[in-house]
C-alpha cells in the first residue's frame, strides 16, 4: 500500500473542503490510499494517520500552506514522526508559504520540493502513482 498524505495549513472554511490532489491520487492506482489532516485535526486522527504511514510502503506528502502564521498544533507531531521514518517518504512537496513547515521539510534534502504550480504537482502525483 502507498499513501498520499495531504496536510492542510489554513482555515478550511476559507477554501472549502475540496482536495483535488487527494482525489486525483486516490483515483490513479488501486494500491494508493489518500488521506488528509489539517491544523485543527484531533490528536487521535493524527495518530491514525501515523499508523497509515507506518503501514505504507511509500508516502507522498503534500503540504498545502495557505496561512503562513497558523500554528501547526498536532500536525507538528505528524511531521516529527515522518522524519523518524524518512525511508518511507517518496517526496515531500510544500505548496504555499509556511516558514516553520518549510524549515522542517527542508531537512528531507533531495526528497523536498517547494512548488505551488498545480500542474507540476499533478505530474509528481501521477509519477508516484505509477510506481
Image (tube, rainbow, N blue to C red):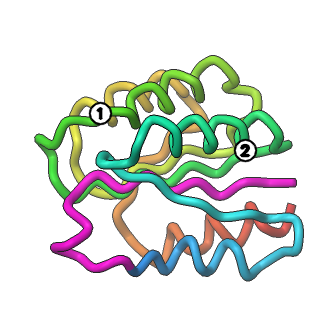
Q: Earlier in the sequence, mark 2 or mark 1?
A: 2
Distance (Cα) linking label 2 and label 1: 19 Å
Give coordinates of residue 28: x percent, y percent: 77, 79
Region of the chain picked out in magenta, as a range: 1-17
Q: Residue furthest top?
A: 84
Along the line of sight, the residue nearer the viewer: 124 or 25: 25
Label 2 SS: helix
Left or right: where 44 falls relative to 50:
left
The residue nearer to you, when weighing 115 against 40, is 40
Within-10-Å neighbours for mark 1: few <14, some 14–19, many 20+: some
Coordinates of residue 3 in the picture (x, y in percent)? 72, 54
**Image quadrant assignment for residue 91:** top right
91 lies left or right of 32: left
Looking at the image, which residue is at 32% across and 27% down? 103
14 sits to left or right of 64:
left
Q: Is residue 15 magenta?
A: yes
Is residue 41 or residue 116 the one in the foreground? 41
Q: Which residue is mark 1?
A: 73
- Location of mark 2 (residue): 52
Q: Nearer the viewer, residue 106 or 100?
A: 100
- Quadrant for residue 70, please give it: top left
User: Is the residue marked by circle 2 packed among few (<14), some (14-19), or many (20+) residues within 10 Å?
Assistant: some
Helix, strand or loop for disc 1: loop
Q: Residue at x 38, y 70 (%)?
A: 117
Q: Residue at x 39, y 25 (%)?
A: 104
Q: Where residue 127 sits in the image (x, y, percent)?
A: 74, 66
Amino acid at each position: 500500500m502507498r499513501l498520499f498524505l495531504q496536510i492542510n495549513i489554513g482555515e478550511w472554511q476559507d477554501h472549502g473542503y475540496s482536495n483535488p490532489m487527494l482525489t486525483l491520487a486516490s483515483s490513479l492506482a488501486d494500491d494508493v490510499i489518500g488521506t488528509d489532516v489539517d491544523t485543527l485535526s484531533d490528536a487521535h486522527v493524527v495518530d491514525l494517520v501515523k499508523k497509515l504511514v507506518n503501514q505504507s510502503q511509500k508516502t507522498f506528502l503534500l503540504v498545502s500552506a495557505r496561512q503562513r502564521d497558523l500554528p501547526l498544533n498536532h500536525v507538528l507531531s505528524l511531521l516529527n514522526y515522518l522524519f523518524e521514518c524518512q525511508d518511507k517518504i517518496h517526496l515531500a512537496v510544500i505548496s504555499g508559504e509556511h516558514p516553520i513547515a518549510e524549515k522542517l521539510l527542508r531537512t528531507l534534502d533531495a526528497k523536498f520540493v517547494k512548488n505551488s504550480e498545480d500542474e507540476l504537482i499533478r505530474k509528481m502525483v501521477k509519477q508516484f502513482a505509477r510506481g
